Image (cartoon, grey):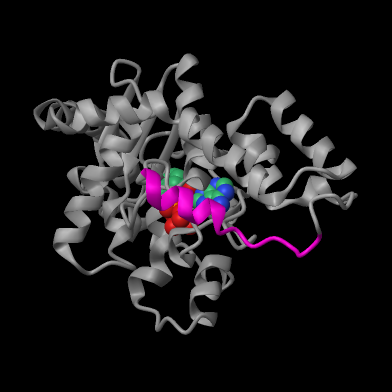
Amino acid sequence: MRTLTGIQPSGQLHIGNYFGAMRPAIEAQARGDCFYFIADYHSMTSLTDPAQRRAHTLGVALDWLACGLDPAKSVFWRQSDVPGVTELSWILGTLVPMGLLERAHSYKDKIAKGISPNFGLFAYPVLMASDILLFDTNIVPVGRDQKQHVEMTRDMAIKFNQTYGETFVVPEPAIRDDVALVPGLDGQKMSKSYGNTIDIFGEEKAVRKKIMGIMMDSRTPQEPKPDADKNLAIQLLRLVAPAEVAADHENRLRAGGLGYGDLKKVLFEHYWNYFAAARARRAELAANLDHVNRVLGEGTVRAHAVADVVLQRARKACGLA
Ligand code: ADP
Ligand code: TRP
């Protein structure tokens, strides 16, 4: 069972990325056969500053390793170091109907926000399909927002197999209901592009300020709150605190007597403790970049070994080789 996922180096990673994609990916290491990469080609659809791309790429590498990606168990590389993925993307692009790409939610959302689309943004799901199919992937851990992209990948694999003969493994998304959509500080989906994030490795003062600034309603602390389960701070507390702590605060909010300020303080403390060990590991890694570069270098070699075989299989199937 091969597990694969990627994250774009398009900004600081946040706890939505962590709970939606990284933690399930890290837990999957217990089963073995894991492939994780930094999607730097994809980041080109939104970011055009080379220095920023380099900095975020290093940041994402440090974040993954600090959060528990174990190079002894997982292959970890930078997408652009295995450039065959762009060739497969071309091949898949010749089979994918325009209509399928036009229906992509993330593409439509970006256009709706007034972003003027380039070809890369339109072709984004084809490159993502290529990432997945190039490694004979079975399982793709992602947040709910990426479900459609994995479904499109399945469509492309099936279409290729029908056209040119059995070549690709048809993958499945792995989406965990409890963390499929982590809300941001404004209650919308937490996203780098919405400015509503709690970063995994945010600076203490800044994150405290952000959490204490979460907007709540104007009910007094004493008022009972029958809708306590929907409270944003409670939803976030469930992620970073033990279940009984989150349940206890939810009950106290429901009964009345717990003020929002105190609740937010508790949320900050649990967030800070939850990532404390990873924060220390990240600082060690940042002081030892040779190690990080070596991990990515070795990952590139191992990723190539798989990708080259699959790409040759695909080339042969469609009469290129
Ligand atoms: P962003 O929306 O912040 O740019 P990405 O698109 O880079 O995040 O997402 C990287 C991974 O993190 C994907 O698997 C995505 O589904 C997951 N993810 C992003 N935001 C959330 C969220 N708010 N809740 C759950 N998973 C998320
Ligand atoms: N599109 C994904 C995102 O924005 C990143 C990504 C690129 C990815 N290639 C992938 C995720 C392959 C899973 C598998 O979050």
Residue 96, image x, y percentages: 48, 64
- Please give the count of numbered marks on the rendered protein: 0
> Which residue appears at 28% of the width and 49% of the height?
85
Residue 229, placed above or below residue 92: above
Residue 50, image x, y percentages: 15, 62
Residue 43, image x, y percentages: 31, 59
Residue 220, placed above or below residue 270: below
Compare residues 306 and 103 and report the one nearer the observer.
Answer: 103
Examine the image and state in which quarter residue 276 appears: top left
Left or right, 123 with respect to 170, comes to left
The residue segment tinted magenta is 204-219
Residue 108, placed above or below residue 297: below
> Which residue appears at 48% of the width and 28% of the height?
273
> Which residue appears at 50% of the width and 23% of the height?
28
Residue 204, image x, y percentages: 38, 43
Left or right, 17 with respect to 308, comes to right
Compare residues 319 and 252 and report the one nearer the observer.
Answer: 252
Compare residues 245 and 114 and report the one nearer the observer.
Answer: 245
Q: Is residue 207 magenta?
A: yes
Q: Is residue 275 magenta?
A: no
Left or right, 288 with respect to 230, comes to left
> Which residue appears at 53% of the width and 35% of the height?
269
Compare residues 58 and 143 and report the one nearer the observer.
Answer: 58
Examine the image and state in which quarter residue 89 appears: bottom left
Residue 130 visible in the current orientation: no
Residue 97 visible in the current orientation: yes
